Image (tube, grey):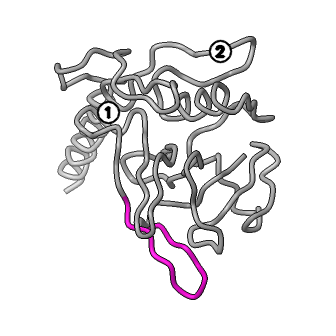
């Protein structure tokens, strides 16, 4: 019995380590890592290949924009280029952009941006930085930029959603009792300059 448990554990370790390595491989040969695939307000989205692929750190005038071509690097580069905004805390994983201790509509001082929870009494707007919580396969979370808002939907633009996922994605937006909700359980909230 102990031998079977040991073999089962060994298989789990191999599968786990294999999944870590496999997330670095570019299976989509339609694009090359670093290729421009989209843009918003003259800020480009670059293709990253496997979601865990990291090439180097991107800095501008000494300011840390993040690891090329991860999701964090895109949203920070967008805020830096489009809004000339530098975050006081320029480090952290995607999910760390949202601070659960900050009340809805109050200043998130680590990012120097106003923070709104999902759901919120404040409707998302174009340019908001959207924060996703982590998952079993992606414990770091995800961040994107809201690129369009309508009465009942938002569109986001994102970098590094996966080798076969699109750079743009639409999500349902609902309003009930003066509260706006993006209907995606992974959305923690949004930040705004």
Residue at 37% over, 60% down: 171
Q: Is residue 114 magenta?
A: no
- Between the C-alphas of marks 1 and 2, the distance is 30 Å
Residue at 63% over, 47% down: 96
Percent across and percent down for residue 124 are: 57, 60
Q: Is residue 177 left or right of residue 3?
A: right
In this rendering, the label closer to the viewer, 1 or 2: 2
Residue at 21% over, 41% down: 11
Residue at 35% over, 55% down: 170
Q: Quick check: 190 above or below 177?
A: above
Q: Which residue is disc 1 drawn over?
A: 17
Pick the front one: 52 or 8? 52
Q: Which residue is disc 2 drawn over?
A: 59
Q: Is residue 177 magenta?
A: yes
Magenta stretch: dominant SS?
Answer: strand
> Range of the magenta residues?
171-182
Q: Who comes first in sequence, dot 1 or dot 2?
A: 1
Q: Quick check: 149 above or below 158?
A: below
Percent across and percent down for residue 189 are: 58, 60
Mark 2 neighbour density, 10 Å: few (under 14) some (14–19) many (20 or more)? some
> What secondary structure is marked by label 2?
strand
Pick the front one: 66 or 118? 118
Q: Is residue 31 left or right of residue 141?
A: left
Which residue is most to the bottom? Answer: 177
Classify residue 63 by image quadrant: top right
């Amino acid at each position: 019995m102990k031998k079977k448990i040991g073999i089962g554990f060994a298989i789990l370790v191999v599968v786990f380590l294999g999944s870590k390595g496999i997330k670095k491989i570019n299976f989509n040969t339609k694009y090359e890592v670093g290729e421009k695939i989209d843009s918003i307000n003259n800020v480009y989205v670059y293709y990253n290949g496997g979601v865990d692929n990291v090439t180097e750190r991107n800095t501008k005038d000494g300011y840390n924009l993040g690891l090329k071509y991860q999701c964090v690097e895109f949203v920070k580069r967008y805020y830096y280029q489009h809004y000339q905004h530098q975050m006081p805390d320029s480090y952290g994983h995607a999910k760390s952009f949202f601070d659960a201790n900050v009340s809805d509509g109050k200043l998130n001082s680590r990012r120097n941006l106003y923070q709104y929870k999902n759901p919120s009494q404040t409707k998302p707007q174009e340019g908001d930085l959207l924060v996703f919580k982590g998952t079993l396969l992606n414990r770091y979370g995800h961040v994107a930029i809201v690129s369009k808002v309508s009465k009942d939907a938002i569109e986001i633009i994102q970098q590094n959603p996966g080798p076969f996922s699109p750079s743009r994605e639409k999500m349902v937006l609902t309003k009930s009792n003066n509260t706006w909700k993006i209907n995606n359980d992974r959305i923690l909230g949004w930040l705004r300059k």
